[in-house]
Amino acid sequence: MSITAALAASRSGLSVAGTRGAITSENIANAGRADYVRRSASLDAPSVGGGVAVSAIRRDVNGALQARERDDVAAAAYHRTLGDGIALYTDRLAGSGSGHALPARIADLQADLDLLSGSPGDTSAQRAVLSSAETLARDIREAANAASEAKANARSAVSSDIAQANKLLDQIATANLRIGETEVGSAQRATAEDARDAAIDRLSEIVDLDVSPRADGTLDLRVGGGAALVEGTEAHHLTFEDGTGTLSAGEARIDITPERSSSRGISSGSLAANVTLTTRKLPDMSAELDSLAEGLVTLFEKAEKTPAARGEGLFVYDPPEDNDGPDELASNLAVNERVRTDGDNELWRLRDGVNASTRGSTSDPTQILAYAEALEEQSFDDSGTSVRLSDYAATIVADHNVAATEARDRAAGHAASAAAIATQRSTTEGVNVDTELQELLSIEQSYAANAQVISALTRMMDTLLDAV
């Protein structure tokens, strides 16, 4: 090797050492950043005997772990949001073992009716029945209102999720533009790729994603069902239509509504959960409460000795509904004002019938027994089954509480899996300061060795020049 070639090789070694030192220093400086991926230098020999050069700055990304973590993050967000949304309602509904649960309220009314049947003229027993009836109506009403509030919260969260998602989609498309304009393997591209990956990580909490890299370093994003969210530098914004409950992507309004067979939609993430809560889960639960209220009103109307028109039994809709089927009836349920203390306060009607024209015998339990028997009848019909009202109430409470509990349990499982994968990613992609310090020592040694070679070559050149 000639002196000139040796000098060039050593100078290239110094240049590489300087670049490696800068990369390592940057790694150490960003060791605490969760969205920073460790950099390393890819080396190349431009020509035989020409020394070495840094061909690219490489990000140590594990794509498989990255995809798995995003899937688990989306699943955890979906189930957590679903469970928390249902719990806003079920916390008011109360657990199946609680004395405040609807089956317990129905049992209280049944017990007070049984006591009153033994002493039909006892005003204190009549007041106990009235209190139990009003408590039952109030709890059904408050549960229905809680379901409505939970639905309103979920609808608000849909708007928040969409706004955040659209902002992140714009950031990802902008990052794609910067990446396409920067040199492959440059520090600027690595920084832009960090920013893009961080935005995708945050977006994966909102919707489930499939990432497709392009040859130029940009990428496409699609939801799990296949609809495009980002294509190169173009972002397809999300919209939601209240009237149809449709979630759409892009100007073409591609249907991505979760749990809709005709859509190319999302199935995970907080947005999928909030849309499901808004359009299906909470409305279905509210409908079951309405059916319970409808059954309660109908049973007591049929139990009246004096035939009662709709809305003239012990339990009524306040204000009364004009339609013939359940429609937010639970939120309007009340005890007939004829017997309420804030109404006509005619407690004797609990003994003689709400629609009785005159007072009856104080010892006649006929009407009271009819009320009690109504609660025992296998006549409440919902979804093709005939059950007691209390059994249907127990099913509602159990099913709705189980839905919240199961969702939260699944969220915990996916969150644990995501945390485990994040730890693996931290090991492979993150910065280990001790390792980087060792790298700095190696770089220092390399720099010193190349400097010594240059120093020796300089002395050799001086000697040759002196000899001329």
Image (spheres, helix red, strand yellow):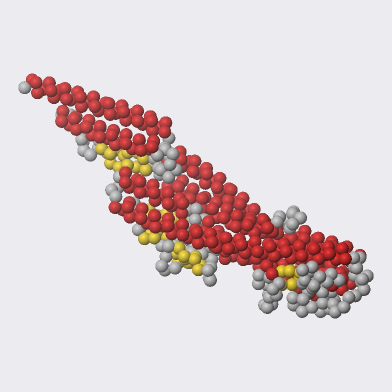
Q: Is residue 140 left or right of residue 176?
A: right
Q: Is residue 392 left or right of residue 78?
A: right
Q: Position of residue 205 (x, y in %)?
A: 50, 53
Quarter placement of the C terminus = top left
Q: How many marks?
A: 0
Q: Position of residue 100 (x, y in %)?
A: 74, 57
Quadrant hosting residue 95: bottom right
At horizontal 8% and vertical 20% (from top left) the residue drawn is: 467
- Does 209 sit above or below residue 49? below
At horizontal 56% and vertical 60% (from top left) the residue drawn is: 154
Quarter placement of the N terminus = top left
Q: Position of residue 425 (x, y in %)?
A: 46, 42
Give the residue at the far left of this rendering.
468
Residue 428 visible in the current orientation: no
At horizontal 83% and vertical 71% (from top left) the residue drawn is: 346
- Does 447 sit above or below residue 174? above
In the image, 175 versus 59, the foreground residue is 175
At horizontal 77% and vertical 68% (from top left) the residue drawn is: 342
Q: Position of residue 213 (x, y in %)?
A: 38, 53
Q: Is residue 81 left or right of residue 93?
A: left
Residue 349 visible in the current orientation: yes
Q: Is residue 189 left or right of residue 150?
A: left
